[in-house]
Image (cartoon, grey):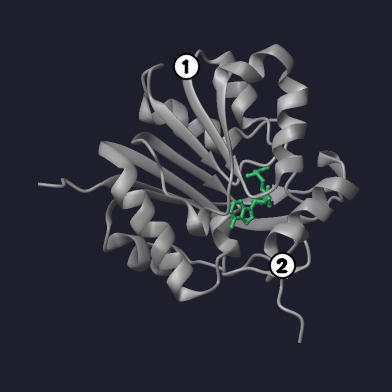
Amino acid sequence: MKKFNRKAHWETIYQTKKFEETGWYQQTPVTSLAFVAKLKLPHTARIIDVGGGDSYFVDHLLDLGFENITVLDISKTAIARAKARLGERAKKVHWIVCDVSQFKPAQQYDFWHDRAAFHFLTEEREIEHYLRTIRDCLAENGFLVIGTFSEQGPKTCSGIPVHQYSEASMTEKLGQFFERIECITLDHLTPFNTTQHYLFCCFKQLNLN
Ligand SMILES: C[S@@+](CC[C@H](N)C(=O)[O-])C[C@H]1O[C@@H](n2cnc3c(N)ncnc32)[C@H](O)[C@@H]1O
């Protein structure tokens, strides 16, 4: 059987579909922005959007005055699209093309955000690597927000399987590394008028001492 090529999969998605033709499309990433507001992050906060694709989250963060934003994605096409959309403003953002399961951060972050990328990691060793990476690069008092499909959500996304989470399983997995702040569930309305049930959880870096 041919081995699944994750990078090629995502490049094909971004080369063949417009953002509005994907299930994860959002004009305004309201839930993510609500967490940003709630956490009262300073404008200097070092923010990373993991699996950011060509989401408008970065546009909103720039509009809000955030000065230190990184967007990471496995797809160079997605990053190129986001950069093209932002034009001159793209120069204010750090862009990383990388598979997060192999990411070795070169700096610390105050806020790690991931909407619908983490759930594509289905192998235990990759999940473990992902969580250890956050633990190692999240600054003291830093926060992370992860949005995944819930156990009532779809079992696949863009044609590939996802790992669904419940509040309990997310808390069990992340609780070994981080302090749980809040989990919420919601229905995301796709451009095809279907709903996808999501779980968003916010955690805080444990005191490292
Ligand atoms: C469902 S889309 C969500 C995009 C964006 N977060 C949003 O909310 O619009 C998943 C994104 O994660 C990226 N992705 C998937 N697996 C990844 C990995 N292992 N490392 C980095 N990015 C990944 C994909 O290229 C895609 O942009």
SS at circle 2:
loop
Which is closer to the viewer, label 1 or label 2? Answer: 2
The x and y percentages for residue 112 are: 43, 41
Number of residues whose C-alpha sits closer than 10 Å to that of mark 1, classed few (under 14), some (14–19) or many (20 or more): some
User: Of 106 and 157, which appears nearest the observer?
Assistant: 106
Instruction: Note whether 93 is above or below 164 in the view shown.
Output: above
Farthest-out residue, left? 209
Q: Which residue is mark 1?
A: 67
* Image: 20 above or below 46: below
Q: Residue furthest bottom?
A: 1
Q: Is residue 85 left or right of residue 91?
A: right
Q: Which residue is mark 2?
A: 5
Of residues 90 and 106, the one drawn nearer to the viewer in this rendering = 106
Q: Quadrant of the N terminus?
A: bottom right
Q: Report the amino acid beneath label 1.
A: Glu
Is 29 positioned to the left or the right of 131 in the image?
right
Q: Secondary structure at mark 1?
A: loop
Can you give x and y, in whole percent of width and height, for residue 43 in the image? 41, 16
The three-letter amino acid code for the residue at tag 2 is Asn
Mark 1 and mark 2: span between their CA atoms? 34 Å
Tell me the tag on residue 96: none
The percent position of residue 190, horizontal first and vertical second, equals 78, 48
Q: Look at 40% across and 28% down and name the residue there.
A: 46
